[in-house]
Each structure stands twice: as C-alpha cells, then as structure tokens.
Image: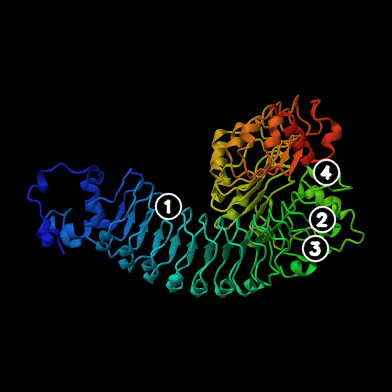
C-alpha cells in the first residue's frame, strides 16, 4: 500500500517542512542507487532510528517516474541487503515488514534492547546479524524464517533461547557467545544443517545430549563457561573438526571418539591426569592444547598421535617428558614453558621445538629407521627443497635451518591457494621479513622467524591478523612497531635473546596475550599497572635482563602462573624467594605494596 493509501494522516505541508536529522542522513543519491542495486549501506552514521525513507524505499520507487536512461523505474529492484551496523539505533519499527525481499539484515553494534516481531515477516532473510546490542530475548517469530543460514547474536544479554529455535532447518551458523545463557533448548538438536556453533562466554554448566544430533557441525566453541564434564555422545558429531573447551572446570580430558576431530583446545581447566583411553580416541588430532592445567605426567600413548603437529603443555606440573615424543613424525611445535621439568636445561627450552626434540631423540634407546627426505618432497629449479605434502596436508610452510639470506619465491608459489597455518623460517640469515608472507594473511596463525639477523619488524607483517603465535627469538630487534596492535589474536610472542632495552610498548595493548618470553635482553623495567590489564597473561619470562628493582605492584598480576626473574641485578626479592616459584614471588611482592 502506498503512503497516500494511508490518507488518514496525510500532511499537505509535508513537502515544505524541514527533514528530520535521520532523513537527512540518507542522501537521495544513495536511495536512488539502492533501488537499482538492491543494497543499502548506512553503517556508522550515528543514526538513532531507521529513517522512514529506508522502510519505504521499495514503494517510493515507482513514484519517481522518469524516462531518463539513469532513472528508468521499471529496471529498479526491491531491497535485498540492508546494512545498519555501528549506529545508535534503539528500536526497529513494525514497518520493517515493508522490506519483504531482504536477504541480509545487519544490525550489529547498535543499542537494541528488543527486536520487533515483524522481523518474522522477512521470509527471504538468510543472514541476520544482531551482535553487540542489548537484547535480553529473541522474538519467537525469528524462528519462522525458514531460509535463515546465519544468525549472530554474540555480545547481548540473552538468558535463554526460544524453544522454537529448532525450526530453522537451514541454519548453518549460530553464534550466541558472550551472553548469559545457563541452558540450551532441546530443539537445538534439530538444526541438522548447522556447521558452526559458538556458545563461548556464557554460564553453561553442562551441554545437552541433543548436541550429538548436530552431525554436520565442524566447529563447536564452548570456551569460558562452567562445564565440569563433556558428554561422550558428542562422538556422534561425525564431522566435528574443531572443539574449544578453554576456561571451564574440566578435571579430565573428554573421551571423544569423534573421527574427524583435528583440533582440541582444553587450556585453562583443572585437568590433572591424561589417561591413555582419552588419547587413543584422538585418531586425527593435529592440534592439542592442554596449557594452564594441573597435568603431572605425559603418558607414552601420546606418541601414538601420528597426525599431531602442535602440542601445547605450557604451565602445568610436568616434571619429565617421554623421549618417545620425539618420534611423532609431524610434530612441529612443542610448548613446555612453565613446567618444573627436571633433567632438561633451561637454555635448551629457549632454543625451540627442534632442539628439544633432538634432545629427546638422543634419549630414545632404539630409534626406528627413517628417511630424512619426505616422500613427497620435490625440487624446484632453484634447487630449493619444498615439502609440498607438508604444505597441502598439514598447512605447514617450512624453510628452516637452511642458512639462507632470502626465502625463494618457489616456496610461496607452492603455497598459493593452500590453507597454510604455520610458517617456519627459523635458523636462516634473514635480515628482513619476506613481504610475500602477506599472501598467507587469511590463514597463517603461527610464524617462526627465530635465529635470524632481523634488526627491525616489518610493518607489513602487522597485516597477518590471524596470528596467534610469533617466534622472534635470537635476532637483533630493539623495538616493535605500534601497528602490531592490529594483531588482536596474538596469544604468544617469543622475543628472547634480542636487544630490547625496554619492554615493548605495543605489548601492553595486546589484551589477548597469554605468553611473553623476553629473556636475555637488556630490559630495565616494566609497567606493572599496564601489565595487570593483560588479564589473560599467564607466562612472563624476564630472566637475564637489567632489572635493578621489581615493582611490588607486579604482585597484582594475579593471572600469572609462571613468572621468571632470575639472572637480573635486583636485590629483592632474594634468591631464596625466587626459587620457591611464582606464587611465592607474587605473594612477597604484594606484601611490599605500601598500605
């Protein structure tokens, strides 16, 4: 119905009145373009409500009759994509139903406390983005949108989900992280098309068995909840590849016979014992994160995980490592910092995975015969050995220990179009970071540039936004660029044995940081107040620097599980306190804070 059809409230002076601020925010040219393209982007315009001209963009189109080539109304189309993110919108009018052709509706980062039920009339909708609002409930009408593929609701105030949620039979992505959910509806199990579900940062104390019916899910994130157990029925999720269980209350590793599980993250729990049966289930595991638990021993069965490429045992209570770990054929990263390991020199641990595995191999009594050359290695014209098998099947780009002053282009050519997650260029003679690394920016999470001759960190590398681990040990670095603040996913950085005279300023801005190793430098001080803002920081190695004093306020960094200070010229805390471990040092420092 046109606006004139609602004539009861027609205003004969409407054309002469000044437009409201919201109306002025939508230039006529933008509306005109929207009628032709079917897309309208009004993100970041400080709107407090949706302008009327937006709701009526479809019905106003025929009124602008023109025979100009650029204004032919018969070629105009209905609005299918409406982007209203990053405004200050507090409500959506019932008139949203005047846009029935919408396929995408983006309202994330606004101030919505409710969502009008009229959204349920947008039957063509496939993508609904409502994250970063103030929604305390989701209208049941949303569950009638049969074509919905993706619903993002993270960072709201949801305490429950509607029981009718299971009606969204075509949904492939559901994100309800960072809410206040205490339970999940049983109907969740009927979302048979779901491939990705995020439940992190809620108040869930258990997972319903109905999750096991989600047989197409590839990624399940249950981090930062209150889980004390994981149902064994999750093994029925036949296509589950990534399972995140960080920051819960788990006391044992879940025993999951999930055949496709490649990545399991169980860091920051209360796991004390690793049982052989739990490990034997992990037939396809590539990444196993067990950091920040209470594990005392690593069973020999760990060496049966032949597909394992990364094992993180940081900050546990492990006193020894089985030599058989060195026989894992694909293990590229072994992290054991923050454990009371006996018989392994500390300087050996700082040299990285290769040296540690070499040491462990030396303890194996009978080393099985093996070929040094991978079966799928091939030689390019430059005579550079490129392990194509490792690139394609493991996502590992390895050109380490070659004593090269540059990385050959052939290596990056071999990586084109591949999902490379790890790049290892350590133990070469690089003086600059290869700019072609940026071609891996969509997938690269781990970068090892240790044992080179780098005297600066290229700003371009700050575009590797997926990086979580960065190893720059044994170089000639003196500082880090401010643009590193863009690496918002970075959790671990190794800067040992460089030339830093102060703690890099940019590290204080990386709130995701969990591990900072900056031993064997010339650091003369740290800012404890700013370190305390890094609420995930659990490992900090400042050993062998130039710290003349340790600020008592460092004791307020209660997230620290491992603090290394030995080898500095300070007088207090005394060595007798340092050897007692991190908890004793932090307690001593807190006792020295002036009342």
Which residue does the numbered mark 1 point to in the structure image? 134
Disc 1 + disc 3, Cβ < 8 Å: no
Secondary structure type for disc 3: helix
Disc 4 + disc 3, Cβ < 8 Å: no
Which residue does the numbered mark 3 point to in the structure image? 303
Secondary structure type for disc 2: loop
Q: How many marks?
A: 4
User: Sequence order check: which comes first, mark 3 or mark 2?
Assistant: 2
User: Sequence order check: which comes first, mark 2 or mark 4?
Assistant: 2
- In the rendering, at what x and y percent does residue 212 appear? 59, 73
Which residue does the numbered mark 2 point to in the structure image? 296
Secondary structure type for disc 1: loop
Q: Nearer the viewer, mark 1 or mark 3?
A: 1
Report the Cα–Cα distance between label 1 and label 2: 43 Å
- In the rendering, at what x and y percent does residue 471 appear? 68, 43
- Asked whether, in this view, residue 423 is left or right of residue 303, the answer is left
Confirm whether residue 238 shows in the render.
Answer: no
Q: Residue at x 62, y 75 (%)?
A: 236
Q: Residue at x 70, y 37 (%)?
A: 495
Secondary structure type for disc 4: helix
User: Sequence order check: which comes first, mark 1 or mark 2?
Assistant: 1
User: Where the C terminus falls, by quadrant?
Assistant: top right
Disc 4 + disc 1, Cβ < 8 Å: no
In terms of image quadrants, where is residue 364?
bottom right
User: Sequence order check: which comes first, mark 4 or mark 3?
Assistant: 3
Q: Nearer the viewer, mark 2 or mark 4?
A: 2
Report the Cα–Cα distance between label 3 and label 2: 17 Å
């Amino acid at each position: 119905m046109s606006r004139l059809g609602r004539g009861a409230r027609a205003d004969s002076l409407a054309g002469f009145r000044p437009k409201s601020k919201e109306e002025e925010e939508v230039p006529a040219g933008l509306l005109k373009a929207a009628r032709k393209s079917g897309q309208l982007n009004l993100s970041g315009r400080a709107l407090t409500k949706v302008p009327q001209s937006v709701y009526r963009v479809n019905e106003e189109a025929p009124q602008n009759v023109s025979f100009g080539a650029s204004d032919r109304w018969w070629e105009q189309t209905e609005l299918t994509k409406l982007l209203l993110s990053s405004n200050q919108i507090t409500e959506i009018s019932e008139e949203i139903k005047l846009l029935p052709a919408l396929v995408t509706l983006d309202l994330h980062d606004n101030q919505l406390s409710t969502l009008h039920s009229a959204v349920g009339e947008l039957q063509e909708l496939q993508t609904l983005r409502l994250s970063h609002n103030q929604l305390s409930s989701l209208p049941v009408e949303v569950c009638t949108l049969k074509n919905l593929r993706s619903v993002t609701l993270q960072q709201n105030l949801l305490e429950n989900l509607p029981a009718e949620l299971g009606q969204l039979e075509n949904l492939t992505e559901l994100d309800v992280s960072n809410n206040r959910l205490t339970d999940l509806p049983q109907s969740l199990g009927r979302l048979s098309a779901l491939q990705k579900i995020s439940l992190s940062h809620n108040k869930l104390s258990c997972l319903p068995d109905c999750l096991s019916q989600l047989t197409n899910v590839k990624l399940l994130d249950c981090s930062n909840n209150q889980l004390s157990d994981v149902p064994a029925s999750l093994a029925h999720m036949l296509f589950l590849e990534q399972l995140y269980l960080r920051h819960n209350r788990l006391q044992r590793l879940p025993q999951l016979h999930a055949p496709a599980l490649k990545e399991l993250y169980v860091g920051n729990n209360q796991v004390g014992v690793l049982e052989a049966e739990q490990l034997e289930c992990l037939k396809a595991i590539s990444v196993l994160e067990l950091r920040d638990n209470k594990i005392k021993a690593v069973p020999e069965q760990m060496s049966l995980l032949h597909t394992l490429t990364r094992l993180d045992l940081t900050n546990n209570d492990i006193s020894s490592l089985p030599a058989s770990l060195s026989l894992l054929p694909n293990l590229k990263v072994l992290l054991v910092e923050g454990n009371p390991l006996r018989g392994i020199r500390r300087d050996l641990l700082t040299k990285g995975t290769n040296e540690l595995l070499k040491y462990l191999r030396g303890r194996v009594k009978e080393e099985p015969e093996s070929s040094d050359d991978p079966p799928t290695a091939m030689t390019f014209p430059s005579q550079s050995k490129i392990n194509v098998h490792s690139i394609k099947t493991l996502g590992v780009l390895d050109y380490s220990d070659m004593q090269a002053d540059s990385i050959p282009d052939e290596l990056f050519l071999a990586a084109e179009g591949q999902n490379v997650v790890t790049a290892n260029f350590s133990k070469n003679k690089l003086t600059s970071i290869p700019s072609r690394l940026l071609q891996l920016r969509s997938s690269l999470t781990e970068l090892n540039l240790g044992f080179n001759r780098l005297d600066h960190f290229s700003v371009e590398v700050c575009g590797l936004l997926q990086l979580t681990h960065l190893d720059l040990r044994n170089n000639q670095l003196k500082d880090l660029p401010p643009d590193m603040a863009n690496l918002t996913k970075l959790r671990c950085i190794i800067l040992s044995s460089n030339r830093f005279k102060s703690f890099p300023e940019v590290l204080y801005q990386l709130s995701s940081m969990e591990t900072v190793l900056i031993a064997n430098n010339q650091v003369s001080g740290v800012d404890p107040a700013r370190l305390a803002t890094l609420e995930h920081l659990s490992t900090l190695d400042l050993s062998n620097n130039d710290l003349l004093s340790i600020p008592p306020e460092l004791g307020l960094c209660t997230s620290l599980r491992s603090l290394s200070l030995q080898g500095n010229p300070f007088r207090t805390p005394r060595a007798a306190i340092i050897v007692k471990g991190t908890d004793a040092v932090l307690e001593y420092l807190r006792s020295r804070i002036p009342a």
